[in-house]
């Protein structure tokens, strides 16, 4: 007797699968159409909401329609609107819809791309992407890389490679040089990679928040004299706090002379390499040993897409490859990469498709134009802000990020931080743009100051939103003046 097949809930009928995808689209398309007018933040009451939806593992299923209702009506709105054109906070992410389509294909077909052998054609697509990124930063023959979940993992991969290449197993005396502008993921990488805290040495910056090569040389000499082992310089190509770009060419020179690994953290700024202005700004990046890039920032992709590219792929492989008898034999062909040998992950999502599809569909030109637009918008915004009373531009934009603060001379200096927080919150309350601030060391006084920052990197941000930002800043400033609705 044959086995009687019955409908199995984990394998819905094709028509039901289609219906569900269509139902999601019925939600997403109007959501996108309203994105422009959705508020910038709606997280008040978030704790209560989170508590209300805690639950045990359900024994019985719930209808798809109901679950979508919960997501789209309750949970998605209760958040920072990171997909909005008004999101100028932190480092804006992306969310190209073509990347979501790529994810749907990758997840349904569920091909395994951690190794070359199980899906050579698909792995080659991801290799193509990595080769494009290598070429973009100026790396040549023998270079390569890996797509990661983000910049933090890429920074870790770079440090592990440097450690393996330069210090081997005795690395506790290794020293990693960076500035106070470094992203905290670099420090985290050092902890995860097993370095003691003393391994991290911050070199002072100049008035533009750039690591000073002259002081770096002195620090390296001091450390060598003390029996330590200078390992790596982690330079910034667009720092998160104020957008600083370190003098990459000069740092490359120091690293060459001293035999140090040069890592460039270009997680935020890297894709500006596609533009003429970005390439000029990053002169010397092609001399790095490794570069972190975040396609989920400057390539406008959804969160979860980072990249590490290295000048010499062999070094990345040597630091990460471990074989196992139950796996296919490693590829001998240098053009056939096993991603499992280039990073800590064995199983992974097919993230290459998410990068490949938008790049192939649009071509680099469209991305270059979008990034050039961000550079122009940033100059437009900073020039408008420059004309406001009592303003100080603390860091001029090198790329698409700058910081500023108001320093009203008729108020005590001690109140300026609170004043700026108030102005920023006044802007954010208007719900058309979202700004964040940061406390940094003032290059003039070496004292901590709070600055407001604006980062323009969303593919959805255009000139109209910049005008809104200026209007809201002016209105928020008026509110904090004596007699204003929010006077301090
Ligand atoms: C300069 C820089 N490096 C590293 C990171 C960490 O990247 P991710 O959040 O993708 O892990 C960021 C994140 O904003 C960054 O701006």
Image (spheres, rainbow, N blue to C red):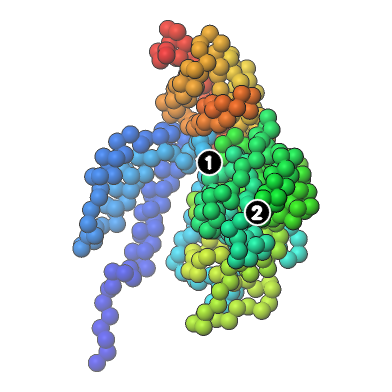
Q: Which mark is on residue 14?
A: none
Q: Position of residue 263 (x, y in %)?
A: 66, 52
Q: Quadrant of the N terminus?
A: bottom left
Q: Position of residue 345 (x, y in %)?
A: 51, 66
Is residue 137 depicted above or below 237 in this figure? below
Which residue is nearer to you in this view: 222 or 177?
222
Q: Nearer the viewer, mark 2 or mark 1?
A: 2
Q: Position of residue 249 (x, y in %)?
A: 76, 45
Residue furthest to the front: 226
- Secondary structure under tag 2 reads loop
Residue furthest to the bottom: 1
- Secondary structure under tag 1 reads loop
Is residue 415 depicted above or below 22 in this figure? above
Is residue 81 depicted above or below 307 in this figure? above
Question: Could you tell me how many numbered marks the image carries?
Answer: 2
Can see residue 286? no
Can see residue 211? yes
The quarter of the displayed image where residue 125 is located: bottom right
Residue pointed to by mark 1: 92
Mark 2 CB near ligand 1 (8 Å cut):
no
Which residue is nearer to you in this view: 17 or 235?
235
Q: Tag 2: Cα neighbours inside 10 Å, few (<14), some, or many (≥20)?
A: some
Q: Answer left or right for 367 relative to 65.
A: right
Q: Tag 1: Cα neighbours inside 10 Å, few (<14), some, or many (≥20)?
A: many
Q: Quadrant of the C terminus?
A: top left
Q: Which mark is on residue 228?
A: 2
Which residue is nearer to you in this view: 486 or 18?
486
Q: Residue at x 45, y 28 (%)?
A: 428
Cα distance, mark 2 to mark 1?
39 Å
Q: Residue at x 56, y 74 (%)?
A: 322
Mark 1 CB near ligand 1 (8 Å cut):
no
């Amino acid at each position: 007797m044959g086995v009687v097949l019955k409908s199995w809930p984990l394998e819905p009928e094709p028509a039901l699968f289609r219906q569900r995808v269509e139902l999601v689209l019925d939600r997403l398309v109007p959501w996108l159409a309203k994105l422009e007018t959705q508020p910038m933040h709606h997280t008040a009451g978030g704790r209560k909401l989170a508590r209300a939806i805690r639950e045990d593992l359900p024994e019985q299923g719930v209808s798809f329609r109901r679950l979508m209702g919960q997501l789209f009506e309750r949970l998605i709105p209760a958040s920072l609107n990171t997909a909005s054109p008004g999101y100028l906070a932190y480092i804006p992410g992306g969310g190209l819809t073509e990347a979501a389509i790529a994810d749907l294909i990758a997840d349904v077909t569920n091909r395994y791309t951690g190794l070359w052998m199980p899906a050579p054609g698909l792995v080659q697509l991801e290799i193509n992407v990595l080769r494009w990124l290598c070429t973009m930063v100026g790396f040549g023959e023998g270079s390569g890389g890996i797509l990661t979940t983000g910049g933090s993992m890429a920074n870790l991969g770079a440090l592990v490679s440097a450690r393996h290449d330069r210090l081997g197993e005795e690395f506790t005396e290794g020293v990693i040089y960076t500035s106070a502008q470094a992203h905290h993921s670099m420090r985290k990488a050092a902890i995860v990679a097993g370095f003691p805290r003393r391994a991290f040495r911050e070199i002072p910056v100049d008035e533009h928040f750039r690591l000073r090569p002259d002081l770096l040389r002195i620090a390296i000499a001091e450390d060598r004299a003390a029996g330590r082992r200078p390992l790596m310089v982690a330079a910034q190509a667009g720092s998160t706090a104020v957008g600083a770009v370190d003098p990459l060419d000069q740092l490359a020179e120091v690293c060459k002379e001293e035999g140090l690994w040069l890592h460039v953290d270009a997680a935020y700024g890297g894709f500006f390499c596609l533009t003429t202005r970005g390439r000029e700004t990053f002169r010397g990046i092609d001399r790095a040993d490794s570069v972190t890039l975040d396609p989920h920032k400057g390539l406008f992709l959804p969160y979860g897409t980072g990249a590490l590219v290295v000048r010499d792929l062999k070094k990345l492989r040597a630091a990460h490859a471990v074989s196992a008898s139950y796996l296919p034999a490693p590829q001998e062909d240098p053009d056939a990469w096993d991603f499992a040998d280039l990073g800590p992950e064995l199983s992974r999502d097919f993230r290459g498709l998410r990068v490949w599809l938008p790049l192939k569909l649009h071509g680099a030109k469209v991305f270059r134009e979008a990034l050039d637009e961000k550079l122009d918008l940033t100059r437009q915004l900073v020039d408008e802000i420059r004309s406001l009373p009592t303003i100080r531009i603390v860091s001029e934009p090198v790329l698409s990020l700058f910081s500023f603060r108001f320093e009203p001379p008729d108020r005590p200096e001690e109140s300026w931080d609170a004043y700026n927080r108030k102005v920023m919150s006044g802007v954010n309350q208007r719900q058309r743009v979202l700004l964040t601030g940061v406390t940094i060391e003032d290059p003039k006084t070496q004292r901590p100051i709070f600055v407001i920052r604006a980062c323009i990197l969303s593919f959805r941000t255009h000139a109209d939103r910049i005008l809104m930002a200026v209007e809201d800043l002016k209105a928020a400033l008026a509110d904090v003046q004596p007699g204003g609705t929010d006077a301090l």
